[in-house]
Amino acid sequence: MDYLLDAWIKVFTFLQLLQNGQKSLQVFIQCIKLVSKQSWPSRKALSTNVNPSHMLSVETLTSSVFLDKRRNSVTAPDPEIIVTFKGKQLMLAAKHSDGPTDQDLVCSDESFAPVCCGKEGAEPEANSHTVQVCDIVAVRTAEDEDDTQTEKKTKQRSQMDQYAFTVSFVRKTRQHQWWCSDVTFHCADQELCEQWVRATNEQLSSLTNRPKSLLVYINPYGGKQRGERIYEQKVAPVFRRAGIFTDVIVTERANHARDHLKTEANLDKYDGVVCVGGDGMFSELLHGLVTRTQTDHDVDQNQSDAELVPCSLRIGIIPAGSTDCVCFATVGTNDPITSALHIVVGDSQPMDVCSVHQKDVFLRYSISLLGYGFYGDLQAESERKRWLGPARYDLSGIKTFLCHNLYEGSISFLPAGDNVGHPRDKQPCRSGCRVCQHSKDEHNEMSGEKEKPGDDSSRGWKTVQGEFIAINSASMSCACPRCPKGLSPFAHLADGTTDLILVRKCSRLDFFRHLLRHTNKQDQFDHSFVEVHRVRKFSFQPRRHELASPEEQSEHLKTTGFNPKISAQTSAVSSWSCDGEILHQAAIRVSVQHQLIRLFARGIEEQ
């Protein structure tokens, strides 16, 4: 019956692999005992990656670990060295001119069984899973692990495998999610175990981009009020495993984190700041860190044409809010463990930031959506219904849509160059985006120019007037789980521009079609009443006039079907929604600050 059970396990495992489709094989070595009974041939006869220590040299692990999917084998970077799974045993072969020399390795997990084997003689490199040293989270010995983790492993442990070390590394899955996986190796030689641990840690210490100390702010009230629990249960264990020191502050009021960063925090102690919360919490850190940086460098933020100093510290985002738009648009998922691992490996993603001014007064910074009209009204309405939680956005959206307000004004903008593309060019911003990388040179060339919106003809500014349902500025795609495409699907994160979207006067049905296309694959800009521009700066001036006379109201009702007092408030002034916060000043000037901050992210990776 044992062989029937073993065969059933193999068939079941194979069916699981077929069901998972393109998922990477979840084949990981749990425990490997090194049995050093035979001696290796002379060092000269072997590859340089093998030493007389009766195992692969330390360079093997610290460079790459290959897990062959077809032959169930682990291959060193040198193709002449291979570890092959054979049933419940492993065979280590070192090939050289005199032929292979094998040494048995026994798997310590008695329930281990191979998955599916391919044809003999297949190239190991063709179907291999590689773990780079930059994806290693940490390496630790058995003594460093928690008692609860090692209780099962140490049970009935023999004398020969009393020494062990565990390598924790990033395992990437579909939907841009990352997990932290472990590989544990056992051996009887303490010196050999320490050699591997020491060499791996030396390689990790050479990665200077990794943070060693972080300042963490937790918003206990954002989203579904799960910020503290998410951090303690999911994020803190990852930071501890990676050996990152953290100072944690649980905020007690609105703008607590912003005020602490601006005045009290000793930023010299930290390699980065982390927020656990939603987009509002991230906005607090953004304003606090940018303001602190400009204050330290004597830069006046009230000057709209001032060249702001980029922040030296990176910002990490642990999603725990209602929407988490910034995290989703820069990582591709709203998973706390994934975000924590991006912080651990030291990823760095530059980001543009829009500065918003009214005349010579600084108002706010924006990194995602700056919306006037429809989104401004929606934000104002939802603020009055915060007690409803995330459902307030749906109810407020329906009410705002039915009101169908129109707002009259003029908008002037400075178009970006052709080298940064167009909002409809079908080129999304992805990890290692060439448009964002090459935009720095052009930004340096234009840094000395001071354009003013009043000098349209000589400076290239353009002006558009009319009645608008919505005026939106998207500095990123603004994608989120509720709207996977985002407001501007092909906006870039760090190209020094923002996508200006103008939705002119139209019927409710046409506007509904425009909104509906945000949820499907159709082009939401393919409407006669919608125009979109990629700009570096823009300013908006609302048109204010007296309330329409009864005759004008009657004529407006005949031509449009809406009473201006009730549904088409052309004389009214809306407010701006700035990353989830309300700006009541309608007349504003916006400038894109090129790559002002950096996040612990790498952009959305191609899959």
Image: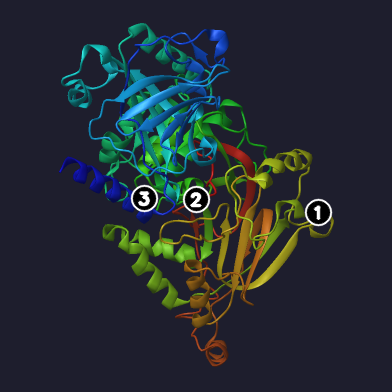
Q: Nearer the viewer, residue 238 or 229?
A: 238
Quadrant, the N terminus: top left
* Position in image of residue 377 (x %, y %): 45, 66
Residue topped by disc 1: 459
In front: label 1 or label 3 = 3
Badge 3 vs badge 2, beta-carbon distance below 8 Å: no
Crowd tier of the residue under label 1, counting other residues whose Cα lies within 10 Å: few below 14, some 14–19, many 20 or above? some
**Residue sitting at x 26%, y 36%:** 233
**Label 2 SS:** helix
**Residue sitting at x 56%, y 59%:** 489
In front: label 3 or label 2 = 3
Q: Nearer the viewer, residue 575 or 394?
A: 394
Crowd tier of the residue under label 3, counting other residues whose Cα lies within 10 Å: few below 14, some 14–19, many 20 or above? some
Give residue 338's quadrant in the image. top left
Residue topped by disc 2: 329
User: Marks 2/1: CA distance?
Assistant: 33 Å
Residue topped by disc 3: 17
Q: Amino acid at mark 3?
A: Leu
Give residue 178's quadrant in the image. top left
Residue 594 sits above or below residue 41 on the image = below
Residue extending farthest to the front is 98
Query: Does residue 247 show up?
Result: no
Query: Does residue 321 show up?
Result: yes
Crowd tier of the residue under label 2, counting other residues whose Cα lies within 10 Å: few below 14, some 14–19, many 20 or above? many
Residue 2 sits above or below residue 60 on the image = below
Q: Amino acid at mark 2?
A: Ala
Position of residue 342 in the picture relative to residue 527 (left or right): left
* Position in image of residue 163 (x %, y %): 29, 13
Position of residue 245 in the picture relative to residue 426 (left or right): left
Badge 1 vs badge 3, beta-carbon distance below 8 Å: no
Badge 2 vs badge 1, beta-carbon distance below 8 Å: no
**Label 3 SS:** helix
